[in-house]
Image (cartoon, coloured by chain):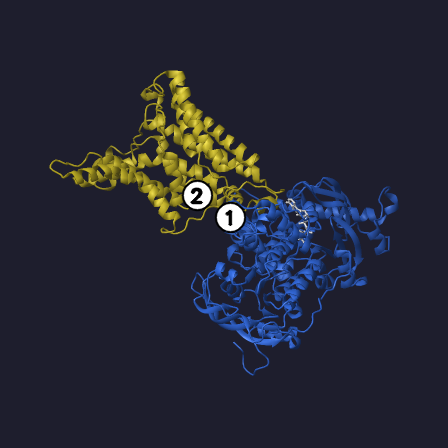
Amino acid sequence: MEALTYFALLLDATLRVSAPLVLAALAGLFSERAGVFDISLEGKMLVGAFAAGVAAHYAGSMWVGLGAAILVSVAFGLLHGFACITHRGNQIVSGLAINILAAGLTILLGVTFFRQGGRTPQLPTEARFTPITLPGAEALKDVPVLGALWSELISGHNILVYFAYAAVPLAAFVLYRTRFGLRLRAVGENPEAVDTAGLSVEGLRYQAVIICGVLCGIAGAYLSIAQSAGFIKDMTAGKGFIALAALIFGKWKPVPTLLACLLFGFLEATAARIQGAFDLTGASDAVRRAAEALPFVIEALPYILVVLLLAGFVGTATAPKAGGIPYVKER
Amino acid sequence: MSNPLPLWGGVGEGAGEFRLRRMVQDAPDLIPGVKHTPAQAALGEGVDVIPPAIELRHIDKRFGAVHANRDVSLAVQAGTIHGIVGENGAGKSTLMSILYGFYQADRGEVLIRGVKKTIARPVQAIAAGIGMVFQHFKLVEPFTVLENIVLGVEGGKLIARALAHARGELARLARDYALEVDPDAVVATLSVGLQQRVEILKALYRGAEILILDEPTSVLTPQEADHLFRILGALKRQGKTVILITHKLREIMAITDRVTVMRRGEVVAERETRATTQEELAELMVGRKVLLQVSKGAARPGAARPGAGRLAVEDLSVVDASGVERVKNVSFTVRAGEIVGIAGVAGNGQSELMEAIAGIRRAAKGTVRISGGAAHGNARDLRRQGLAHVPEDRRRMGLVTAFAAHESAILGYHDDPAFTGPILLDRRAIVAHCAAQMRDFDVRPPDPHLASESFSGGNQQKMVLAREIGRDPEVLLVGQPTRGVDIGAIEYIHRRLIALRDAGKAVLLISVELDEIMSLADRILVMFDGRIVGEVQADKADERLLGLMMAGIDPRTPREAA
Ligand SMILES: Nc1ncnc2c1ncn2[C@@H]1O[C@H](COP(=O)(O)OP(=O)(O)OP(=O)(O)O)[C@@H](O)[C@H]1O
Ligand SMILES: [Mg+2]
């Protein structure tokens, strides 16, 4: 029973840790399926997190915080779009620039506004997204397995977590069942086909970039006003890149991407839990060092997996064919 | 159409407008300003003059420094098949892309059925009833046929209904025009011939009354091309208008009603097909007399070094990535001073054979020897031994399209001391070398600094040939040397290949064009299903015999050759 509870808690943490990854990966999914590669998920999450922290602090409302995060993140997305879609710039360079801009700007503004070393002020509970207890969670608590699952694992998360997981089937539906999704996938594969079918390549790509901005904004808000009670500098800590890795690992498909996010989230949660969890008294130096290194090895696994995937050991990753290439008709 | 989505309303309107115009045209005197074009006058009658399906007036278009269309005017009568011919880079594709709204003209106007239309984007062309099958297809490869068909005309927010509607419509079109294709097949898995059908279906599904086909047959086997022409005939009988761009004058003579000739961005002539000949068209295109078949003397194989097989292929087998044996125990030799042609329907192992000989694909077994040298090696060693290779796909394997012409001109030979010092490339020498090659092979424009992709197909091909022939190889491998190339350039390329032969070199030619094989080769090997199923002396070959052998039947033996 002891082990079971431990495992349930681990899964519970996995859901929490994975939520922003899922949101960011879906953001990347929309952008990249439309042919706009986006390494600036990280940067957009960061500015989103910052904007959420600031706005929630001043307005005293998490909803205002969320709105601000979305707005700012979309603005950065449009910047990326303006550089890559309108001016046909290099998508990697633009993404890189946005990441650098985001990192610098959030620190600069944070320090200027609040003088707390880049932090935004601690938010009161009313200005944060807090856990929701789902109906029946209390009552069913003692029902073995299913009831426990419901009350321990499913219930008790904040609304953004539920949104993140609901967004996956929604994204799949949009992508595969709707006109918009069909066009979006087409423009990422062959923009000329879209153009000659009488559709606007630029229009579709801008729409994709905006959706990407919205989702990154929500992911950022999750970090600063749901998971924590305020913004801390560099708080994304590479999550945007992990999400990107999950997207590649999931081969740009919603459900596999979700699974990749959960896997990566699980690894992160595990790493956090085993840190210092071993009793090392009497262990040799080598064992001690290995135990200390273990969490880092686990945290590095997502990246190692992606490298293996790209090297062809875990199947082939097929990126949208027109991804990364600006659409130029007349030379 | 049983259940038209809103989209088809537009097409219906178009038809109504057409009827109206026609009534107006029936009494032309009542309408001031309605002028007859010369084309209409040629049609005579006068009373029931139908406005041309399409009229282009004074179209002008530049791409940077390139003047692709100069003041082009063109009228195409409704219900006819209209051919457009012209050299590579003459501006045919550009003109049609302007008509389809893919490019925007700098000047000029477009009239559809006598009504002036602004066509700035493809959506407007589609609404005006124009459909286009581009030279390079515009399909989404991972999509199914149905998804490609409905893209852009889904008629609702969800695609399920559009797909169902398209399925029914496709069945009808397949019946009416012999355009069968599996609606659920993924486009990437279809042959080029079938992909082309999808493009035609796409246009018809959008209600196209005017169909433009840009070099549709350059990628087709002869059988597929015949089928396409039957489809075009059916379209014409249904009253649709077809514009056909092609380099093959035989096709023009066989299927078109009128033909327009373009040269260097201008329309230089227009003819009634009945009243012209291939020779006249060729001359109009190129601006000088062209030999449609280059004459050549008898081969003198072995004259240079009697008895020596310059290229000896022995028991060669090739297995592809998916484990299928594509070349099966092939042996043959090519002697100095002869051209050996390999004929066959595309996909019977010729490409794999050629790549294996060139050393860019590993053979499962067997040997390749150049001038009796060491057996096999990689592409680099083979080149050192005097092998040159003009690959089938010049854009993918012959050039680096993003490189300037002079950079592409030394690919594979960049370590030649003539081009490089101890560390740096000698730019000036390379550019001079490229300029000389361009003069020698009449590459247009002769600008070594232009990006390789900016040259038209025929000129790209000349650049690759110039590079490979320029090395004075002992053995030349050439794949599809004139695919998509205009007749002026074909004549030139054929001449150069024969000159190479006469200089005592060995040439191995792989081509799906029977005409080309028959006019160039001294001996013809026929490939079917990975094997060489027969050999024919060129003077004893005819199309029927080769055609049967290409289908795996050797009529000279009682049993099937395969
Ligand atoms: N997108 C483009 N950007 C720049 N230049 C172009 C472009 N398309 C065509 N050109 C140039 O315009 C000229 C006309 O090209 P076009 O493709 O219309 O010729 P074409 O008659 O269709 O030739 P081909 O028989 O080889 O297909 C060429 O010099 C070509 O290099
Ligand atoms: Mg063309």
A157 above or below B268? Answer: above
B488 above or below A277? Answer: below
Badge 1: chain ID: B
Instruction: Give the secondary structure at mark 2.
Output: helix
In the picture of the structure, the residue carrying the numbered disc 1 is: B160
Of labels 2 and 1, the one closer to you:
2
Q: Colour in which chain A is shown?
A: yellow
Q: Nearer the viewer, residue B247 or A284?
A: A284
Q: Quadrant of residue B6?
A: top right
Name the spot of residue A304 as percent of width and height, x first: 33, 44
* Residue type (three-letter) at the residue carrying disc 2: Ala
Q: Nearer the viewer, residue B428 or A127?
A: B428
* Chain shown in blue: B
Considering every residue shown, the one lying at the far bottom of the view is: B558
Q: Is residue B549 visible?
A: yes
Name the spot of residue B360 as percent of width and height, x first: 49, 60
Q: Nearer the viewer, residue B183 or A194?
A: A194
Instruction: Give the secondary structure at mark 1.
Output: helix
In the picture of the structure, the residue carrying the numbered disc 2 is: A172
Q: Is residue B5 visible?
A: no
Q: Is B233 placed left or right of B393 in the picture? A: right
2 and 1 marks on the same chain: no
